[in-house]
Amino acid sequence: MKLKITHTTSYSYDVPVSYGLQQVRLTPATNQNQTVLDWNVEISGGAQELTFQDQYQNQTVLVQAEPGATEVCVQVSGEVETHSSDGIFGKVYGAAPLWHFVQSTPRTTAGKGIRKLAKCIRGDADILSDLHELSKAVLLAVPYGEADTEAGTSAEEALAAGGGVCQDHAQIFISAARTAGVPARYVSGYLMMNDRVEQEASHAWAEAHIDGLGWVGFDVSNGISPDERYVRIATGLDSREAAPITGVRLGPSAESMIVSLQIQQ
């Protein structure tokens, strides 16, 4: 399946920014599940300072705001051909060892609620079925959109709130899997919803490592494993490490953000 993507993120400031620097993780890589046919990154109100691969092999662009800028716009666009894989990313490894993906972070530290969910993973031979049961249990405990969460909401906080979005579902799943000793990581990317071109936002899901299969994806929010409608962009221990854009700025300005995303065949 060939997917055409245009993703625009615009930041506006009520006071000119004296200094701003953003890490942009919005460049997909060609792998066994997708082939990048064309991809462009356009910046207005700032300039690309550096491109590099981070510790998870995410292609990262450093964008510095122009001094005195009141708006910075990051637009990525291109075409990606995806391939069906039954949710299996496989035995693909970078510099980070598997034990690294059993570590907790402030956003994925397990509390009493997540430790209870982790009991879905019984440690028997059918770990794949256990992980699918965990995915169902997370969605049952945290229905989509039933509570307001923020970018910095932790997995345990979202579980206690009783609702969340794809970011929360992925982090709860990851935290529970790690509690049971299963390496797990966060994946950010795109999902083409079949009934629309205008998408609400970028998407997120989880991957767990299973001996013999490698990395396997679980989209808790939609109750499926990723298929050819998905484009992966970045991975990390949690939503912060795989976030499309993170950054810092100096000065007293207040920031507002508008995101536009179109995906179509």
Image: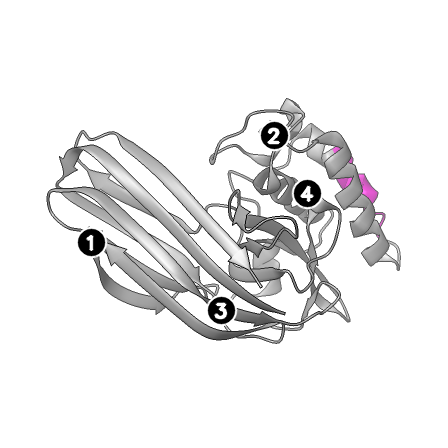
Q: Amino acid at mark 2?
A: Ala
Q: Is residue 52 left or right of residue 230?
A: left
Q: Is residue 84 visible?
A: yes
> Image height check: is 209 above or below 106?
below
Q: Amino acid at mark 1?
A: Gly
SS assignment at label 4: helix
What residue sits right under mark 3 in the picture?
79
Q: Amino acid at mark 4?
A: Ser
Q: Residue at x 88, y 60 (%)?
A: 125
Q: Are marks 4 and 1 in contact (CB under 8 Å)?
A: no
Is 126 part of what is drawn in magenta? no
What residue sits right under mark 1 in the picture?
46
Dot 1, crowdedness within 10 Å: few (<14), some or many (≥20)? many
164 vs 114, nearest the viewer? 164
Q: Residue furthest right?
A: 125
- Mark 4 or mark 3: which is in front? 3
Dot 2, crowdedness within 10 Å: few (<14), some or many (≥20)? many
Question: What distance separates the C-alpha of mark 1 from that of mark 2?
Answer: 35 Å
What residue sits right under mark 2 in the picture?
158
Return the disc, 4 or 2, that comes first in the chain's sequence. 2
Question: What distance separates the C-alpha of mark 4 from that of mark 3?
Answer: 25 Å
217 vs 173, nearest the viewer? 217
> Image height check: is 126 above or below 252?
below
